[in-house]
């Protein structure tokens, strides 16, 4: 079953075509990567999913509902490229805030805060202020804010941005755990092809607003690297 369905999706800004007849499906429980060079249309597509951009034409659905229906985004969580929050909040305060925004309170809120903090492995820094923790720890805190709610789809924009190699490894392991153990669907917008090759089940490549490739990773790559495949695809569609 598909959690995201895009049919002939198009979006223009004046004469500029940001998206042109995009057909794209994301299966529930998968790790899906949206790839493409700068200006390919990735951000516009993500904003369309979040209801921040009105499409020119086509149909875009989340959980079988048109994205124009606000209820389509129930159970959907988004982590921007640069997660930030009030620096004087502790990690626990921050996760609690997002839990309350999800309508949680009392015992259930506290239990889900503890569970989210445990899943991402930040118990030791739970009572530290956000301005005292590392970039990797802050990114993990961002993941915890997604997990405190009852979400089934995580939309991540450049989740490795600004992380050192150890931070990338930590976040990558976390994604694997969320997909395999928690059964979540993860939709990633990223430029880091080497890491996407290790993480994703399927991917799509956008170029100049058009869909250049889409499918299962193993079926598309057939032994080549994602970097080589990406380069050939983009060059072939220039």
Image: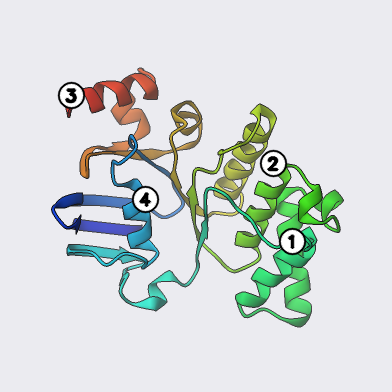
Q: Nearer the viewer, mark 1 or mark 3?
A: 3
* 112, above or below 80, in the image: below
Q: Do the residues bearing badges 2 and 3 touch, measured as CB atoms within 8 Å?
A: no
- Quarter where residue 218 is shown: top left
Which quadrant, please, contains the N terminus? bottom left
> Does the residue at mark 4 contact the one at mark 1 (Cβ under 8 Å)?
no
* Residue underneath mark 2: 136
Pick whichever of labels 2 and 4 is earlier in the sequence: 4
SS assignment at label 2: helix
Q: Do labels 1 and 3 touch, CB within 8 Å?
A: no
Res 149 → quadrant? bottom right
User: Quick one: label 1 or label 2, which is nearer the N terminus?
Assistant: 1
Tell me the CA gap for discs 2 and 4. Answer: 23 Å
Q: Which residue is mark 3?
A: 236
Residue 85 percent across, percent down from the top left = 66, 60
Q: Nearer the viewer, mark 4 or mark 1?
A: 4
Relative depth, front residue between 150 and 192: 192
Front position among marks 4 and 3: 4
Which residue is disc 1 drawn over? 115
Q: For mark 4, what is the residue?
A: 43
């Amino acid at each position: 079953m598909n959690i995201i369905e895009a049919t002939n999706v198009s979006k223009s800004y004046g004469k500029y075509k940001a998206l042109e007849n995009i057909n794209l499906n994301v299966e529930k429980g998968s790790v899906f990567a949206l790839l493409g060079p700068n200006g390919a249309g990735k951000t516009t597509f993500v904003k369309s999913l979040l209801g921040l951009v009105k499409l020119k034409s086509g149909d875009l659905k989340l959980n079988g509902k048109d994205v124009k229906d606000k209820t389509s985004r129930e159970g959907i969580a988004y982590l921007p490229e640069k997660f930030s929050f009030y620096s004087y909040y502790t990690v626990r305060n921050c996760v609690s805030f997002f839990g309350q925004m999800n309508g949680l309170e009392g015992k259930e809120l506290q239990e889900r805060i503890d569970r989210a903090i445990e899943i991402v492995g930040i118990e030791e820094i739970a009572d530290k202020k956000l301005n005292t923790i590392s970039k990797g720890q802050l990114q993990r805190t961002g993941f915890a804010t997604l997990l405190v709610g009852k979400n089934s789809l995580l939309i991540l924009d450049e989740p490795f941005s600004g992380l050192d190699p150890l931070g990338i490894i930590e976040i990558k392991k976390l994604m694997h755990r969320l997909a395999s153990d928690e059964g979540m669907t993860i939709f990633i917008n990223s430029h880091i092809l080497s890491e996407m090759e290790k993480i994703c089940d399927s991917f799509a490549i956008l170029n100049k607003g058009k869909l250049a490739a889409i499918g299962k990773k193993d079926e598309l790559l057939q032994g080549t690297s994602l970097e080589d495949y990406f380069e050939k695809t983009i060059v072939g569609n220039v």
